[in-house]
């Protein structure tokens, strides 16, 4: 007979409070935008002290489930795919810093999903979608020399392509992966000689989407992604 470890582990009070508060949100007793009960009410309801309440509330905040502002009662956050991926920012940063090979994996992931997304965009883009992409490209051209704004427009261009899929998770994933690449592993403000190439490649991608040609759009995207892979390097 196997020797099973049946020891009961004593949990912190704040962990118990966290579970109760999590259940309040998950059950819909308090919904997005609603104020959480006051600390005093929670202390009376659960029979615990203020430190346990505050620690549990901070854990909920760290997970993105509630927002905490000084002098105001905490509120339940509206959960979206974007907030979901945002919770991974710190972990992604640490992963890239401690595991350089993860950067190559991230590049490969980007190439894989961007190829599919641009095909969908070429098949589904409406005239309104084209107008938005053209406006983003025009904005990017106007921000030539302003690397921070130029990169913001770069992210917006790819995010818009992802949004044409109609899948908000893909849109949020596109935005997050690009931000991880730009923020953590790029000479992000030194794109000397690369801005014009990026603009030309974006223009070529847009032309293929406008033409409704998914094969050409995919080829243009692959050229763009493969060329830009060399811009990303782990910060030392």
Image: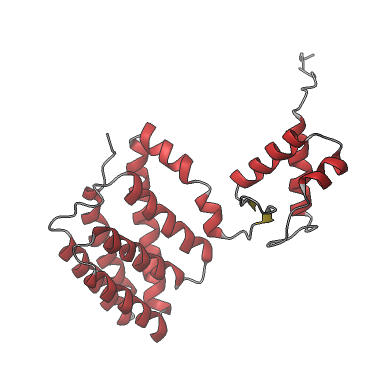
- Identify the residue at image location x=34%, y=73%: 214
Classify residue 196 as left or right of residue 188. left
Residue 29 in view: yes
Classify residue 31 as left or right of residue 199. right
Residue 96 quadrant:
top left
Q: Where does residue 38 sit, x and y in percent of width and height? A: 77, 49
| Residue closer to the observer: 103 or 137 | 137
- Quadrant holding the C terminus: top left
Q: Where does residue 2 sit, x and y in percent of width and height? A: 76, 15
- Identify the residue at image location x=47%, y=42%: 90
Residue 213 in view: no
- Quadrant holding the N terminus: top right
Vertical comparison of 75 with 213: above or below: above
| Residue closer to the observer: 94 or 106 | 94
Classify residue 108 as left or right of residue 140. right
Q: Where does residue 186 sit, x and y in percent of width and height? A: 27, 47
Q: Where does residue 129 sit, x and y in percent of width and height? A: 40, 80
Seen as rendered, the residue at the extreme left is: 193
Classify residue 100 as left or right of residue 60. left
| Coloration mode | secondary structure
Residue 201 quadrant:
bottom left
- Identify the residue at image location x=42%, y=36%: 94
Seen as rendered, the residue at the extreme bottom is: 127
């Amino acid at each position: 007979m196997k020797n099973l470890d049946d020891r009961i582990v004593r949990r912190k009070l704040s962990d118990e409070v966290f579970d109760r508060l999590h259940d309040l949100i998950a059950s819909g007793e308090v919904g997005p935008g609603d104020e959480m009960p006051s600390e005093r009410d929670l202390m009376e309801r659960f029979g615990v002290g203020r430190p346990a309440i505050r620690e549990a509330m901070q854990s909920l905040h760290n997970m993105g489930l509630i927002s905490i502002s000084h002098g105001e009662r905490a509120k339940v956050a509206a959960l979206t795919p974007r907030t979901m991926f945002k919770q991974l920012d710190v972990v992604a940063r640490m992963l890239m810093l401690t595991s350089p090979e993860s950067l190559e994996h991230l590049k490969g992931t980007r190439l894989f999903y961007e190829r599919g997304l641009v095909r969908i965009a070429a098949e589904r883009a409406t005239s309104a979608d084209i107008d938005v992409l053209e406006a983003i490209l025009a904005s990017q051209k106007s921000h030539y020399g302003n690397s921070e704004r130029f990169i913001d427009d770069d992210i917006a261009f790819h995010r818009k392509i992802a949004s044409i899929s109609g899948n908000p998770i893909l849109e949020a994933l596109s935005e997050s992966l690009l931000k991880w690449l730009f923020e953590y592993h790029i000479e992000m403000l030194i794109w000397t000689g690369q801005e014009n190439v990026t603009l030309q490649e974006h223009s070529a991608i847009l032309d293929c989407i406008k033409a409704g040609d998914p094969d050409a759009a995919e080829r243009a995207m692959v050229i763009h992604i493969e060329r830009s892979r060399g811009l990303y390097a782990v910060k030392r």
